[in-house]
Image (cartoon, rainbow, N blue to C red):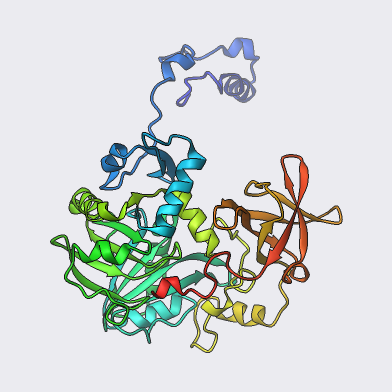
C-alpha cells in the first residue's frame, strides 16, 4: 500500500479492487495495517530548527564587542554593536555612523562572495558576462561591474580586480555567490577558453577599514605606501598587514577613504584585534550592517536586490554608464542597446523628507492622491538631520526639487527629489 500503509489510499484501493473483481467493497475487505499505522503527534516531531548557519572568522570577536545579530541568507552578521553607554539601536547606529564619517570604523565584510579567475582568456569571459569592459583593466586596478541577463536585467554587482594579465579577483554580493559562480561556469562551457574559476569565499576573510583616519591606522600595520599617489582610489595591491599576507583594495562603498582587506580566514580574529588596537588612538569603532547601509545610502550607492527588483535594468537605476555598448557581443547587449534609446517607465531617484518623518522601506509614494511609486531604502541621516531615501517614481517626477508625498504610518508626509548624492556628491573624500 505504499509509504502510508493504507492510511490515505486504502479506500480508493479497495474501490479499484472491488471494481476489477466484480465484488462489493465490503466483500473485498481491507488490507492488513502495518507499522507505522497510528497517527504521529506533533509533539513527537517538535525539536530544534536545523537551518544552516555560517559564521565569519571574526564571529566571536563581534560577540565580545556587543554585536546584535541579524541573518543575511545563511550568514550571521552584526546589525549594530551595543556598548556600556549605548544599548538602543538608533543611538548605537548613529555613533557608528559618526565614527566612520569623522574618525575611522571597521566592518567585517567576509560574507562577500570571492572568486579567483585565472587563465589567458579571463578577459574574454568577463567581457562576455559583465556589462562593462574588463579586458582593458590594467593590473593593479579595480573596477565596479554589473552582471545582466539576456533581457538586460541587473542580476548582481561587485568589484573586479586585475592582479595580473591572466589573473582576476571578483567579489559578489553576499546572497548571489553561488549564482554568479554557476553563471560564469555556464557561459564557459563549450567556449574552449583557458579559464579556471576558484571559489575562495570560505578560505578568505575580509575587513573594510574606512574613515578620514583609515590611512593613519593602516600605516601602523603595513609597509605599503598608502599615499594617494602610490595607492590611488580604485587601485589594488598585495602586501602584508600585521604580518599577514593580504590583498588590499582601495574602494569606498561607505563614501570615505578606505581599504577592503582580503586575507586568509585563519587570521581573521587576529587581524580584527590588530586593527582595533592600531586604531585605539583614533577612537576607532566597529560598525554593523545598519550603519553601513546608512553610509552607502548617503552616497546613493545602489544595493542590487534591495533597490532593484527582478525587472530593473541599469538605465532605470541611473547606472547606464556600467554598460559598454560599443563592446563586442555580451550577455544582454541587444536588450540594453534597445533600452538605451527608450524612455524608461520608472527611474530610481533620491528624496529628502521635508520634516522629521521616517518612511519604511517599501512605503507608497503618491502625487495628487495617486499612487506613483515606492520607497526602496530610507534612513535618518544625521548629516542632513532628516530622513533620506531612494524610490522608484515616473521619469517626469525626477526633476530637481519636485515634490512627492510619502505614506508614513497611515498619513502622508511631503518630500522633495534631489538628483545629487546626499553626501560628498563629487566624491572628493573617496580620493583623499
Q: How many marks?
A: 0
Residue at x 58%, y 14% (from the top left corner): 28
Nearer the observer, 398 or 57: 398
Figure check: 67 above or below 226: above
Nearer the observer, 179 or 254: 254
Q: Quadrant of residue 312?
A: bottom right
**On the rendered structure, is 89 left or right of 108?**
right
Q: Quadrant of residue 230?
A: bottom left
Nearer the observer, 414 or 127: 414
Residue at x 47%, y 20% (from the top left corner): 5
Visible residue check, residue 418: yes
Residue at x 47%, y 79% (from the top left corner): 132
Question: Which residue sits furthest right?
Answer: 368
In the image, residue 9 lies at what x, y percent? Answer: 56, 23
Question: Which residue sits furthest front?
Answer: 281
Figure check: 73 above or below 229: above
Quadrant placement of the C terminus: bottom left
Visible residue check, residue 192: no
In the image, residue 191 lies at what x, y percent? Answer: 37, 79
**On the rendered structure, is 83 left or right of 362?**
left
Residue at x 39%, y 44% (from the top left corner): 78
In the image, residue 406 lies at what x, y percent? Answer: 74, 51
Q: Quadrant of residue 197?
A: bottom left
In the image, residue 315 lies at what x, y percent? Answer: 62, 74
Figure check: 363 above or below 156: above
Amino acid at each position: 500500500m505504499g509509504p502510508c500503509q493504507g492510511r490515505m489510499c486504502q479506500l480508493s484501493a479497495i474501490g479499484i479492487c472491488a471494481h476489477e473483481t466484480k465484488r462489493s467493497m465490503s466483500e473485498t475487505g481491507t488490507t492488513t495495517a502495518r507499522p507505522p499505522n497510528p497517527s504521529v503527534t506533533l509533539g513527537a516531531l517538535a525539536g530544534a530548527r536545523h537551518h544552516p548557519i555560517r559564521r565569519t572568522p571574526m564571529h566571536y570577536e563581534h560577540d565580545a564587542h556587543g554585536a546584535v545579530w541579524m541573518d543575511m541568507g545563511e550568514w550571521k552578521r552584526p546589525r549594530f554593536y551595543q556598548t556600556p553607554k549605548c544599548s538602543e539601536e538608533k543611538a548605537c547606529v548613529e555613533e557608528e555612523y559618526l565614527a566612520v564619517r569623522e574618525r575611522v570604523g571597521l566592518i567585517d565584510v567576509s560574507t562577500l562572495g570571492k572568486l579567483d579567475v585565472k587563465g589567458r582568456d579571463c578577459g574574454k569571459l568577463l567581457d562576455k558576462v559583465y556589462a562593462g569592459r574588463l579586458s582593458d583593466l590594467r593590473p593593479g586596478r579595480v573596477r565596479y561591474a554589473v552582471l545582466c541577463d539576456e533581457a538586460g536585467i541587473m542580476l548582481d554587482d561587485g568589484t573586479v580586480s586585475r592582479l595580473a594579465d591572466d589573473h582576476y579577483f571578483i567579489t559578489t554580493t553576499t546572497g548571489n555567490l553561488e549564482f554568479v559562480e554557476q553563471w560564469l561556469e555556464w557561459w564557459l562551457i563549450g567556449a574552449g577558453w583557458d579559464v579556471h574559476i576558484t571559489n575562495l569565499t570560505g578560505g578568505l576573510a575580509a575587513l573594510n577599514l574606512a574613515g578620514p583616519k583609515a590611512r593613519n591606522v593602516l600605516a601602523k600595520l603595513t609597509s605599503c605606501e598608502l599615499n594617494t599617489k602610490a595607492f590611488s582610489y580604485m587601485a589594488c595591491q598585495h602586501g602584508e598587514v600585521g604580518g599577514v599576507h593580504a590583498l588590499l583594495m582601495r574602494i569606498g562603498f561607505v563614501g570615505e577613504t578606505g581599504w577592503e582587506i582580503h586575507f586568509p580566514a585563519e587570521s581573521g580574529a587576529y587581524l580584527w584585534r590588530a586593527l582595533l588596537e592600531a586604531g585605539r588612538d583614533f577612537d576607532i569603532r566597529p560598525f554593523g550592517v545598519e550603519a553601513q547601509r546608512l553610509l552607502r545610502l548617503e552616497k546613493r550607492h545602489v544595493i542590487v536586490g534591495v533597490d532593484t527588483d527582478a525587472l530593473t535594468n541599469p538605465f532605470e537605476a541611473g547606472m547606464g554608464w556600467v554598460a559598454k555598448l560599443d563592446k563586442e557581443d555580451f550577455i544582454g547587449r541587444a536588450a540594453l542597446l534597445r533600452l538605451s534609446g527608450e524612455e524608461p517607465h520608472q527611474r530610481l531617484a533620491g528624496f529628502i523628507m521635508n520634516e522629521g518623518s521616517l518612511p519604511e522601506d517599501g512605503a507608497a509614494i503618491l502625487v495628487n492622491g495617486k499612487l506613483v511609486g515606492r520607497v526602496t531604502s530610507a534612513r535618518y541621516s544625521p548629516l542632513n538631520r532628516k530622513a533620506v531615501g531612494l524610490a522608484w517614481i515616473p521619469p517626469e517626477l525626477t526633476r530637481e526639487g519636485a515634490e512627492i508625498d510619502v505614506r508614513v504610518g497611515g498619513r502622508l508626509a511631503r518630500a522633495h527629489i534631489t538628483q545629487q548624492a546626499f553626501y560628498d556628491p563629487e566624491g572628493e573624500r573617496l580620493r583623499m
